[in-house]
């Protein structure tokens, strides 16, 4: 991999690497331990410099995932080189939205929004192709989006699962008709089992 030889400065830090992207998991348990995050970022900057690369801090984010309700722990980044790093409430990594509460809320909202935009072309194609072809188009362009990363939907709330099913129901009513009761599209909850 591109960054395979990058090692954390502290043994309690965990690095997730994918090609030229990485996630740092740094435990911050007190206001003093945010210096560990600073050390890790400086370590990455040094590694990048040694490998004739540049770390662009404007593309870096800090996503605080805190057990305590004290968000000030993360706002103690005081190293002058780190002032451009933005603190965010969610981040996208490999197509999955991770939020500061480790819930699926942000991911499902983004996925259903993108999938809903793909319903319009399905409507346009309805008079031109068969139901079977519409089902195939749905499967490849919409359901694949709704089911991306679904094996990890552990703890998905009934409400979020329902929003996925609602979008599939909308697609089903386009493919067949509004009052159709056929089982052309298997429920997503059953497919996740």
Image (tube, grey):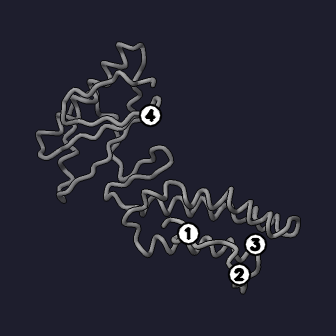
Residue 29 horizontal/vertical position (percent): 14, 47
x 41%, y 48%: residue: 91
Task: Give the CA separation, mark 2 to mark 3.
Answer: 11 Å
Q: Say which of marks 1 and 4 sits in front.
A: 1
- At which x and y percent is residue 100? 32, 54
Query: In the visual, does 150 lie left or right of 154?
Result: right
Q: CA distance from mark 4 to mark 2?
A: 43 Å
13 relative to 102 in the view: left or right: left
- Indicate the position of residue 46 as horizontal and vertical percent values: 30, 18
SS type, badge 2: loop
Residue under label 4, please give it: 18
Distance Cα–Cα, label 3 vs label 4: 38 Å
Please say if the residues under marks 1 and 2 sit with CB atoms less than 8 Å apart. Answer: no
Earlier in the chain: of badge 1 and badge 3, it is: 3
Residue in the picture at 21% in, 28% down: 39
Residue under numbered circle 1: 188
Label 3 secondary element: helix
Q: Residues within 10 Å of mark 2 (few under 14, many from 20)?
A: few
Upstream in sequence: badge 1 or badge 4: 4
**Of callouts 4 and 2, the N-terminal one:** 4
* Vertical order, 88 against 36 (above or below): below
Instruction: Please tell me which residue is depicted at 48% across the width and 62% down the height of the picture.
Output: 108
In contact (CB < 8 Å): disc 4 and disc 2 = no
Alpha carbon distance from label 1 to label 4: 29 Å
User: In the rendered view, would you say 21 is above or below 165?
Assistant: above
Label 2–label 3 contact, CB within 8 A: no
Asked if the residue under mark 4 is in contact with the one under mark 3, i.e. CB atoms within 8 Å, the reply is no
Q: CA distance from mark 1 to mark 3?
A: 17 Å
> Which residue is label 3 attached to?
175
Where disc 4 sits, the SS reads: strand
The residue to which callout 2 is attached is 182
Q: Quadrant of the N terminus?
A: top left
């Amino acid at each position: 991999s591109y960054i395979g030889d990058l090692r954390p400065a502290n043994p309690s830090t965990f690095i997730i690497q994918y090609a030229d992207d990485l996630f740092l998991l740094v435990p911050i348990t007190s206001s003093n331990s945010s210096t560990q995050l600073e050390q890790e970022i400086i370590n990455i900057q040094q590694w990048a410099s040694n490998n004739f690369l540049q770390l662009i801090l404007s593309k870096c984010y800090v996503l605080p995932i805190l057990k305590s309700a004290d968000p000030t722990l993360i706002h103690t980044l005081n190293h002058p080189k780190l002032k451009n790093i933005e603190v965010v409430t969610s981040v996208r990594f490999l197509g999955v939205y991770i939020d500061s509460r480790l819930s699926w809320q942000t991911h499902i909202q983004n996925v259903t929004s993108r999938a809903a935009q793909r319903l319009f072309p399905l409507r346009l194609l309805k008079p031109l192709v068969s139901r079977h072809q519409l089902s195939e188009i749905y499967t490849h362009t919409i359901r694949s989006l709704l089911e991306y990363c679904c094996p990890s939907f552990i703890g998905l709330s009934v409400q979020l699962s329902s929003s996925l099913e609602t979008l599939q129901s909308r697609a089903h009513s386009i493919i067949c008709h509004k009052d159709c009761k056929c089982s052309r599209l298997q429920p997503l909850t059953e497919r996740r089992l």
